[in-house]
Amino acid sequence: MSMMQIAVLTVLPAAVAFAAAMDLFTMKIPNPISVLLVLAFFPMALFAGLDPWSIANHLAAGVLMLVVGVILFIPGWFGGGDAKLMAAIGLWIGADNLLAYTLYVALAGGLIAVVFFSVRAVPLPRALLGEAWALRLLAECEMRSAEARETTAQDLFQEALGLGAELGMRPLVAHCHAGLAMFHQRMGEPQKAQEHLTVATTMYREMGMTYWLEKAKAELTEAE
């Protein structure tokens, strides 16, 4: 096994694994990872004894993958970090292995997409569903606190609203709209308050939650 093959099987997977971890936890692939991969290739290629033609072969693969990445980035199908990382990987593996690499990436991406959508279709545990309710309760406490900061309650309501909508928790979404109606009424923004109240009362009525329907109207009237 050549020095270059050893590097491709050790250094490259380690860097790509780190990039994948960063992408998973931060939704971003830092540029330094791709830059370091590109910079590390050249001393490694010289140390491995690659001839100029072989180095040109690797450079062509990197440029080609960068072009493909940019084309996919323009319509929003690909992230900028993904495009740069794909180009750096192409530089390391060379043109001879490019077709197999692209095929493996496509198959792995398709498999991950299937797994992702399958997991999304499974109802979440109650413990995770409770997070959205907890955010809404925090928002209520913040809004009613004497030392409440103006934007904190609104941010919490919006976060709970977004999570509740994503999880299909309609009662929680209605409660969040009712809370935002109260918040904007207290902030002297009656038009925004009425918009949220309209959404909340409509949802309460559709779900037959008459108690909460009347409660939301009464609380908003008291806050005027």
Image (spheres, rainbow, N blue to C red):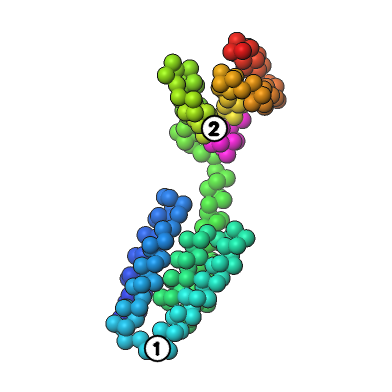
Is residue 157 magenta-colored? no
Q: Which residues are magenta?
A: 161-171
Is residue 169 magenta-colored? yes
Residue at image x 50%, y 65%?
Answer: 83
Number of other residues with Cα within 10 Å of mark 1, as a class: few under 14, some 14 to 19, many 20 or more:
few
The answer to whether one can see residue 129 in this image is yes
Query: What whole-number distance in Å separates the C-alpha atoms at marks 1 and 2?
Result: 57 Å
Residue at image x 62%, y 15%?
Answer: 220
**Residue under pointer 1:** 52
State yes or no: discs 1 and 2 in contact (Cβ < 8 Å): no
**Residue under pointer 2:** 158
Residue at image x 55%, y 56%?
Answer: 113
Q: What amino acid type is highlighted by mark number 2?
A: Gln
Q: Which corner quadrant of the image does residue 37 belong to?
A: bottom left
Q: What amino acid type is highlighted by mark number 1?
A: Pro
Depth check, front residue: 74 or 102? 74
The answer to whether one can see residue 182 in this image is no
* Magenta span: chief secondary structure: helix
